[in-house]
Image: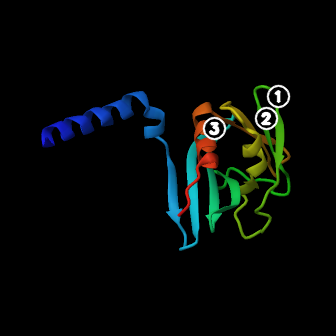
């Protein structure tokens, strides 16, 4: 009986790895912040069209079983990127949908290479997996354009739709 259970477990594990590899490689993490609040986070390393590296962290907080916030934090390489934090983030899809997200880090205590945007409306209206382009205003009046590939958008949608009551 133990051999059958072990064989079944191995076959099931292989099936999940082979046929469901995208979910097996997902990087959505759960962080209990207190007895009443949980944070879920997806972190991606992305590049803009000028080949500069960015960290994109989409996270949501659940408090008392209710969505408290859903934010996208973008971090450029220190010393190379200075964001115009008073500007909104523009998000576009390949089909021409456009959204704007407000920056929620207007506090000057954050370094100029960090911005964070309220991403709730974007995720509410993003009903399929499609590449996104994020347009960020920089302090030198130029624009950084980050391409978010389908696999990252799919993970973001999974994070948004994930319901987990503590």
Q: Is residue 142 visible?
A: yes
- Image height check: is 133 above or below 88? above
Q: How many marks?
A: 3
Dot label at residue 108: none
**Image quadrant assignment for residue 100:** top right
Dot 1 or dot 3, earlier in sequence: 1
Q: Residue at x 57, y 56 (%)?
A: 40
Q: Within 10 angstroms of label 3, few (less than 14), some, or many (20 or more) residues?
A: some
Q: Are marks 2 and 1 in contact (CB under 8 Å)?
A: yes
Q: Nearer the viewer, residue 162 or 86?
A: 162
Q: Nearer the viewer, residue 58 or 76?
A: 58
Q: CA distance from mark 2 to mark 1?
A: 6 Å
Q: Within 10 angstroms of label 1, few (less than 14), some, or many (20 or more) residues?
A: few
Judge from the rendering whether residue 17 lies leftward or rightward of residue 144; answer left or right. left
Query: Which residue in the protein does label 3 denote?
Result: 153
Secondary structure of residue under mark 1: loop
Residue 157 location (% of width, % of height): 63, 42
**Image quadrant assignment for residue 33:** bottom right
Dot label at residue 92: 2
Q: CA distance from mark 1 to mark 3?
A: 16 Å
Query: Which residue in the protein does label 1 denote?
Result: 96
The residue lying furthest to the front in this view is: 1
Q: Residue at x 76, y 55 (%)?
A: 118
Secondary structure of residue under mark 3: helix
């Amino acid at each position: 009986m133990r051999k059958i259970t072990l064989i079944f477990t191995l076959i099931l594990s292989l099936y999940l790895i082979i046929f469901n590899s995208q979910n097996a490689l997902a990087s959505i993490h759960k962080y209990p912040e207190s007895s009443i609040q949980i944070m879920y986070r997806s972190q991606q390393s992305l590049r803009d069209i000028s080949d500069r590296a960015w960290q994109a962290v989409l996270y949501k907080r659940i408090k008392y079983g209710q969505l408290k916030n859903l934010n996208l934090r973008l971090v450029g390489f220190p010393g190379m990127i200075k964001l115009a934090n008073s500007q909104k983030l523009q998000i576009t899809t390949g089909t021409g949908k456009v959204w704007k997200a407000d920056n929620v880090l207007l506090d000057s205590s954050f370094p100029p290479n960090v911005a964070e945007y309220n991403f709730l409306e974007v995720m509410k209206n993003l009903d399929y997996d499609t590449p996104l382009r994020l347009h960020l205003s920089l302090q030198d009046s130029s624009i950084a354009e980050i391409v978010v590939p389908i696999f990252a958008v799919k993970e973001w949608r999974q994070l948004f739709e994930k319901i987990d009551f503590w």
